[in-house]
Image (cartoon, helix red, strand yellow):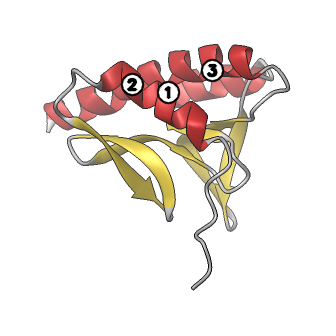
Amino acid sequence: MADKKEAPNLDLLDRISEDYKDEPEVMMGTMFRSPGLRVGGKIFAFLGFEGQLIVKLPRERAVELVGAGTAEEVVMGTRRMREWISFPCGDDRDATLVLWRDVAQEAFTYVDSLRRAN
Protein backbone atom coordinates (compact mmCIF):
# COMPACT_ATOMS: atom_id res chain seq x y z
CA MET A 1 0.00 0.00 0.00
CA ALA A 2 1.36 3.44 -0.94
CA ASP A 3 2.20 5.97 1.75
CA LYS A 4 -0.35 8.71 2.12
CA LYS A 5 1.13 11.99 0.87
CA GLU A 6 1.43 14.60 3.63
CA ALA A 7 -0.30 17.90 2.94
CA PRO A 8 2.07 20.75 2.06
CA ASN A 9 2.67 23.06 5.03
CA LEU A 10 1.00 20.71 7.51
CA ASP A 11 3.77 21.64 9.95
CA LEU A 12 2.55 25.27 9.90
CA LEU A 13 -1.05 24.20 10.51
CA ASP A 14 0.13 22.01 13.40
CA ARG A 15 1.90 25.01 14.94
CA ILE A 16 -1.24 27.11 14.56
CA SER A 17 -3.31 24.36 16.17
CA GLU A 18 -1.13 24.67 19.29
CA ASP A 19 -2.65 28.15 19.80
CA TYR A 20 -5.99 26.45 20.50
CA LYS A 21 -4.87 23.69 22.86
CA ASP A 22 -6.86 25.30 25.71
CA GLU A 23 -10.01 25.65 23.58
CA PRO A 24 -12.02 22.46 24.16
CA GLU A 25 -14.29 23.16 21.16
CA VAL A 26 -11.35 23.34 18.70
CA MET A 27 -10.06 20.19 17.04
CA MET A 28 -8.41 19.05 13.85
CA GLY A 29 -10.78 18.02 11.08
CA THR A 30 -10.96 17.92 7.31
CA MET A 31 -12.47 20.03 4.55
CA PHE A 32 -12.43 18.57 1.04
CA ARG A 33 -10.07 15.87 2.37
CA SER A 34 -7.59 18.53 3.51
CA PRO A 35 -6.53 19.02 7.14
CA GLY A 36 -8.04 21.93 8.99
CA LEU A 37 -9.26 23.36 12.27
CA ARG A 38 -12.84 23.18 13.51
CA VAL A 39 -14.65 24.99 16.29
CA GLY A 40 -17.81 23.28 17.45
CA GLY A 41 -17.75 21.14 14.32
CA LYS A 42 -17.42 24.08 11.91
CA ILE A 43 -14.24 24.54 9.86
CA PHE A 44 -12.59 27.93 10.23
CA ALA A 45 -9.21 27.25 8.58
CA PHE A 46 -7.79 24.51 6.37
CA LEU A 47 -4.95 23.81 3.98
CA GLY A 48 -5.64 23.98 0.26
CA PHE A 49 -4.25 21.40 -2.13
CA GLU A 50 -1.30 23.65 -2.97
CA GLY A 51 -0.45 24.24 0.69
CA GLN A 52 -2.15 27.62 1.08
CA LEU A 53 -4.14 28.48 4.22
CA ILE A 54 -7.83 28.98 3.52
CA VAL A 55 -9.95 30.76 6.14
CA LYS A 56 -13.53 31.92 6.58
CA LEU A 57 -13.91 35.62 7.39
CA PRO A 58 -16.73 38.16 7.17
CA ARG A 59 -17.23 39.18 3.54
CA GLU A 60 -16.13 42.79 4.13
CA ARG A 61 -12.86 41.66 5.74
CA ALA A 62 -12.26 39.12 2.96
CA VAL A 63 -12.72 41.83 0.32
CA GLU A 64 -10.34 44.11 2.23
CA LEU A 65 -7.56 41.49 2.40
CA VAL A 66 -7.98 40.52 -1.27
CA GLY A 67 -7.95 44.20 -2.27
CA ALA A 68 -4.73 44.73 -0.32
CA GLY A 69 -3.09 41.88 -2.22
CA THR A 70 -2.57 39.86 0.96
CA ALA A 71 -5.08 37.13 0.10
CA GLU A 72 -6.77 35.58 -2.91
CA GLU A 73 -10.42 34.75 -3.53
CA VAL A 74 -11.36 31.09 -3.34
CA VAL A 75 -13.20 29.68 -6.35
CA MET A 76 -14.64 26.16 -6.28
CA GLY A 77 -15.42 25.08 -9.82
CA THR A 78 -17.15 28.19 -11.17
CA ARG A 79 -18.44 29.38 -7.82
CA ARG A 80 -16.73 32.22 -5.95
CA MET A 81 -16.83 31.47 -2.22
CA ARG A 82 -17.92 34.76 -0.64
CA GLU A 83 -16.38 34.38 2.81
CA TRP A 84 -13.43 32.08 2.05
CA ILE A 85 -10.02 33.48 1.12
CA SER A 86 -6.59 31.92 0.78
CA PHE A 87 -3.12 32.93 1.88
CA PRO A 88 -0.14 31.41 0.06
CA CYS A 89 2.94 30.26 1.88
CA GLY A 90 5.67 32.79 1.22
CA ASP A 91 9.40 32.18 1.01
CA ASP A 92 9.80 33.43 4.59
CA ARG A 93 8.05 30.68 6.56
CA ASP A 94 8.35 32.58 9.85
CA ALA A 95 6.54 35.59 8.36
CA THR A 96 3.97 33.25 6.81
CA LEU A 97 3.35 31.64 10.20
CA VAL A 98 2.79 35.05 11.83
CA LEU A 99 0.29 36.05 9.12
CA TRP A 100 -1.45 32.68 9.17
CA ARG A 101 -1.78 32.74 12.97
CA ASP A 102 -3.36 36.20 12.81
CA VAL A 103 -5.91 35.31 10.13
CA ALA A 104 -6.65 31.94 11.73
CA GLN A 105 -7.48 33.78 14.96
CA GLU A 106 -9.78 36.14 13.06
CA ALA A 107 -11.44 33.16 11.40
CA PHE A 108 -11.82 31.33 14.70
CA THR A 109 -13.46 34.37 16.30
CA TYR A 110 -15.81 34.81 13.34
CA VAL A 111 -16.89 31.18 12.96
CA ASP A 112 -17.24 30.76 16.73
CA SER A 113 -19.51 33.83 16.85
CA LEU A 114 -21.67 32.43 14.03
CA ARG A 115 -21.91 29.11 15.80
CA ARG A 116 -22.88 30.70 19.11
CA ALA A 117 -25.51 32.89 17.44
CA ASN A 118 -27.42 29.81 16.26
Vertical comparison of 79 with 54: above or below: below
Q: Residue at x 14, y 39 (%)?
A: 118
Q: Quadrant of the N terminus?
A: bottom right
Badge 2: residue crowd in 10 Å (few <14, some 14–19, many ≥20): few
x and y percent of residue 8 in the render?
A: 68, 48
Q: Amino acid at mark 2?
A: Glu
Vertical comparison of 110 with 35: above or below: above
x and y percent of residue 79 in the render?
A: 63, 61
**Relative side of 32 to 41, left or right:** right
| Residue behind mark 1 | 15
Q: Residue at x 61, y 57 (%)?
A: 6
The answer to whether the residue labelled 2 contacts the one labelled 1, judged by CB atoms less than 8 Å apart, is: yes
Residue 67: which numbered mark, if any? Answer: none
Pick whichever of labels 1 and 3 is earlier in the sequence: 1
Helix, strand or loop under label 3: helix
Q: Amino acid at mark 1?
A: Arg
Q: Quadrant of residue 89?
A: top right
| Residue behind mark 3 | 97
Badge 3: residue crowd in 10 Å (few <14, some 14–19, many ≥20): some
Q: Amino acid at mark 3?
A: Leu
x and y percent of residue 13 in the render?
A: 53, 35
| Residue behind mark 2 | 18
Could you tell me how far apart the alpha carbons at marks 3 and 2 are, in whole angstroms?
A: 12 Å
Badge 1: residue crowd in 10 Å (few <14, some 14–19, many ≥20): few
Helix, strand or loop under label 1: helix
Residue nearest the observer in this picture, 104 or 98: 98
The answer to whether the residue labelled 1 contacts the one labelled 3, judged by CB atoms less than 8 Å apart, is: yes
Could you tell me how far apart the alpha carbons at marks 1 and 3 are, in whole angstroms?
A: 8 Å
The answer to whether the residue labelled 3 contacts the one labelled 2, judged by CB atoms less than 8 Å apart, is: no
